[in-house]
Amino acid sequence: MDLLKELDGRNVSELGGELHRFAADLYPICRSITGNGIRQTLKMIQNRIPLQIFEVPTGTPVFDWRVPKEWNIRDAYIKAPDGKRVVDFQQCNLHVMNYSTPVHATLPLNEIRPHLSTIPEQPDWIPYRTSYYKEDWGFCLSHNQMLQLDDGDYEVCIDSTLEEGHLTYGECYFAGRSSDEVLISCHACHPSLANDNLSGLAVSTFLARHLSGRDLRYSYRFLFIPGTIGAITWLAQNRKAVGNIRHGLVLSGIGDVGGFHYKKSRRGNAEIDRAVACVLRDCGESSEILDFSPYGYDERQYCSPGFNLPVGCLMRSVWGTFPEYHTSADNLDFIQPASLAGSLHACLGIVDVLENNRRYVNQNPYCEPQLGKRNLYRATGGDSIGTEINARLWVLSLSDGDHSLLDIAERSKIPFFTISEAARLLCDASLLSPLT
Amino acid sequence: MDLLKELDGRNVSELGGELHRFAADLYPICRSITGNGIRQTLKMIQNRIPLQIFEVPTGTPVFDWRVPKEWNIRDAYIKAPDGKRVVDFQQCNLHVMNYSTPVHATLPLNEIRPHLSTIPEQPDWIPYRTSYYKEDWGFCLSHNQMLQLDDGDYEVCIDSTLEEGHLTYGECYFAGRSSDEVLISCHACHPSLANDNLSGLAVSTFLARHLSGRDLRYSYRFLFIPGTIGAITWLAQNRKAVGNIRHGLVLSGIGDVGGFHYKKSRRGNAEIDRAVACVLRDCGESSEILDFSPYGYDERQYCSPGFNLPVGCLMRSVWGTFPEYHTSADNLDFIQPASLAGSLHACLGIVDVLENNRRYVNQNPYCEPQLGKRNLYRATGGDSIGTEINARLWVLSLSDGDHSLLDIAERSKIPFFTISEAARLLCDASLLSPLT
Amino acid sequence: MDLLKELDGRNVSELGGELHRFAADLYPICRSITGNGIRQTLKMIQNRIPLQIFEVPTGTPVFDWRVPKEWNIRDAYIKAPDGKRVVDFQQCNLHVMNYSTPVHATLPLNEIRPHLSTIPEQPDWIPYRTSYYKEDWGFCLSHNQMLQLDDGDYEVCIDSTLEEGHLTYGECYFAGRSSDEVLISCHACHPSLANDNLSGLAVSTFLARHLSGRDLRYSYRFLFIPGTIGAITWLAQNRKAVGNIRHGLVLSGIGDVGGFHYKKSRRGNAEIDRAVACVLRDCGESSEILDFSPYGYDERQYCSPGFNLPVGCLMRSVWGTFPEYHTSADNLDFIQPASLAGSLHACLGIVDVLENNRRYVNQNPYCEPQLGKRNLYRATGGDSIGTEINARLWVLSLSDGDHSLLDIAERSKIPFFTISEAARLLCDASLLSPLT
């Protein structure tokens, strides 16, 4: 409860502004699944929370995969016959297909064309493309940019390196009263794309900072990793830690103005699935619960059948369903301070459910206890009761040892924190006792 | 079946009229959770059915509660400076807050105001208020009445007593072939309120009279008790009888013109829950099934987690959802003879399901038996079959020992009595045998 | 898969034409539940598939029934006073009530009337009537025909025989790799009615021909039987074979232009129920799944509680719900080549599910395997994936030994054949292994 109350006390627009500024600081960096972009990003996160940074050498076998070569880039451009840069990495790092091999040549336009990607339907936007596992080079540009290119010989230059090196990821761990863990994971490998996934990085960082130094029931592990290969690498190198994970969330695309979408874990009815559904139901924003599917973010790996971890994915607009997805239009205007603050608030609400969801036993199970003599009821009969008293009746009615507070919140349709507060009051009045 | 057939043979409007007249006879009495009002009410019920009346002394501990002092009232009024009674208990017993302590004083109007209750939204109606557990006094009046009070000194008088005495309740028990019981409970503690709950008292009394003297499968126990404290007292003093309760119904607010509402027991899928749903589905009136919630009538006590009895609550309009609730507008015009008769009919239908719901075994389980040679089928092929024949096919198909007649009525969507009649015919034809 | 692919390669309108021509060949025959009509019909089916024909003597006890006398008819008419045939069996065999006893008499019209059936609402159509188990005679005619009959003496003649003989049915059995059987059953007892059930006879015959000579997982048994008494007779005489039936379908009324209707088996969640639902979901035509009910076609017998076989019924328009049902308007125009071909295609799709529905085990269950290095993924990242790749991810995700391909097709909402093809590719890549 205190987690949420403290946040509720803060100025939301101020908090949203902070989140947005942090995303803005990270925005210009050219990240990829390896290299200095993600390294620099992790350092900036480390300035805010106690992050341990790991380096895994190229070639390390990780399940069916190997850690790839490290990619770094300094510059890239296409120069027109008149020597002017018509496509310039310095202006936007999306202009280079991520993981492009180095190239420097002068070629006629028609030989360059197969290496160019545009979005004809959105002629002003630059697409985001990658080629991690097939060595190739390419440029991305707006369709209008491409239409302006006249025939002629162009100088193409990608000043990149693809060499033995490392895959880098960051981990922030808070030990709780139990070694049982809550995993929060977000991908940190996309270049200048704001919702995907600077939104996740910012919310995750602030969530970690908010939990830092508290006395918590669960231990919390925050991962900032490259998508897919990062999750695979972490899982391969942390088989023991995996066994402690009781609940998990992948955070991605949670900064836009769309309503919440929660994709359930492969299990479909894990406590995390129910906790998120319960929080979103009462969060005051529109929300939708989606069934698990094996395509998506790193829940793909956490939920692979050998692990089958209870890890879901919290998003706002769902990847691939909005035109800005994986384009230059997913910029800092596409994410909003209020949305980021709302996402942080929802995450804390979820943590609050996990921290406080217990089963209790009614100490007076035969008939209702007389709440009135304990000042837990209204004095004058005749009218109806309010939600607080109703929550007390629900907690008393269902606290038979079989029902958790989350069960009660679900069945009563009363917000979890109201149910949780009722349980606290009833415990104080010795009418309820936690089931140890 | 005979239960229903007999009722179907009666003139419904005549029956409704009788029910309404009984409610009208009970209407003027000033009932409360203790005292002579409920005592007199129980005596009038005793004139119609073999009711045993119990008196439980003030102070008797009943679970977390104690039986309260007994309250009685002779007169009450507010006299204007000119000596005229401007609020008069003799005109309507709702004018006094139920359980008001005695008072006799002359006070300026502004000192009386905190003791007055009105309903500004319904300026002609008198509200119903109680203060059972906080000693206080008060008057209830219409908002228009209050607006007419000029400043000045008024004589307030409540000629009541609140003393050691008894809590009174009535019980009517019919022994059936089995000691397994059906409990029918209704609260008898409200003063001049017709739907809440003279409707329940009348229907329950007539239901008991209708079952009286019959050879029944179950034993039946009818309780006429003060709400909440009465149910708690009965449960505290009848721990043994509680163990025999197999099905139960709280009847309240079943005289108005609204459709039926049935609130399920805490178990949610008890036989009584399914029986009521099945009867209401086919009763020809609109009806709605509501999930259990811990606030409501005495099902609150019967369904408390220590007992968790299979007791639901049958209503028409749901308490608190219509403006007349707990006001003087819940009068004899608010309940209708046809509604009371329809409620009695529904109750008998429910009893009919409980009495006749058994599992049978098809004696010819391999392929359909040849119904035609037993005159249980149509003669000429080509057209479709009617509901009676369809019911026979359903009973034969599902009577494998696993399905009860209620299961079959639910799945086939055919009324229970048609299914039950089909089972009887098939038994007569030796095609079906009851599972003992 | 090959089953379907082969059919997909064929010209559908050509196939539909063949099906319709076969129905047209069978149309003129006057079939009944016994006699030469069904015998001749079975011979014509025998010309196309290896059908074994069985004769069961009149009087043979079959569960609660006995095989009835054999009925044959040569001619029947009503002659007007002027000697003209006003109702003529030679023009339409529906004119005689099926199973009519012989009669030859001259009677005044008013004595004949009780033996005449018409459909006043459809004055140009002749109804179809039977009287199998009550010896009687009758004529069916259009209502307009009847209105033109003037008073007078008419000669009625039904040149039929109802004598000791046989009940005839046909069976076509293909042994598969397992003795576990799929049963396909259709009634072959209706005279000139096209949808009911020449459609079923034609589709069933062609389905058998298509499966003939293949290496199949299951054994397949096709029954062409008189309705009700035929199914009862077959079940009575084949108690041993019944034990091998794992899945079954009754085919009837599958030639009209209506969408598909599948009535589930009594079990309600048998593999056949789910297989049909999955195929119909993706068949490109409208379809509806109906709960089991004990009235209908021969699933009545297969699903009787003693057998409770997993046998459902595939139809297009549901019997009794369209005006042409059991009238002369259910003629060759009422069934369409495209509908017949679509029904055959659906049946093959269902067989394809049954044949290929297995559980597999992901050989790389920890994280996703790297599909890209096996050419099972797209090369360039950034955009979404297609259904084929998605199917592979689903198969990998759910192949934990608990989920069958049908489970996966249901949950993923991807057509079964796409899921099945994905499983094949993943097996080829050694990423998946069938659970033996």
Image (cartoon, coloured by chain):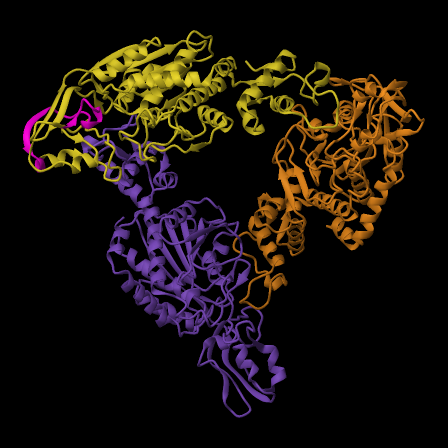
Chain colours: A purple, B yellow, C orange
Q: Is residue A102 visible?
A: no
Residue C333 position in % (x across, y down): 80, 43
From the viewer's side, name the closer residue of C168 and C385. Answer: C168
Q: Is residue C270 visible?
A: yes
> Which region shows up in magenta?
B86-111
Which residue appears farthest toward the front when viewing the image?
Answer: C151
| Residue plotted at (35% across, 54% down) | A346
Q: Is residue A344 above or below residue A92?
A: above
Q: Quadrant of the C terminus of chain A?
A: top left
From the viewer's side, name the closer residue of B97 and C199. Answer: B97
Q: Is residue B163 left or right of residue A238?
A: left
Residue A316 position in % (x across, y down): 43, 58
Inspect the magenta stretch and tell me whether residue A309 lies in it.
Answer: no
Residue A238 position in % (x across, y down): 43, 55
Q: Is residue B78 left or right of residue A301?
A: left
Q: Is residue C374 above or below residue C12?
A: below
Residue B55 position in % (x across, y down): 23, 12
Q: Is residue C62 above or below residue A251?
A: above
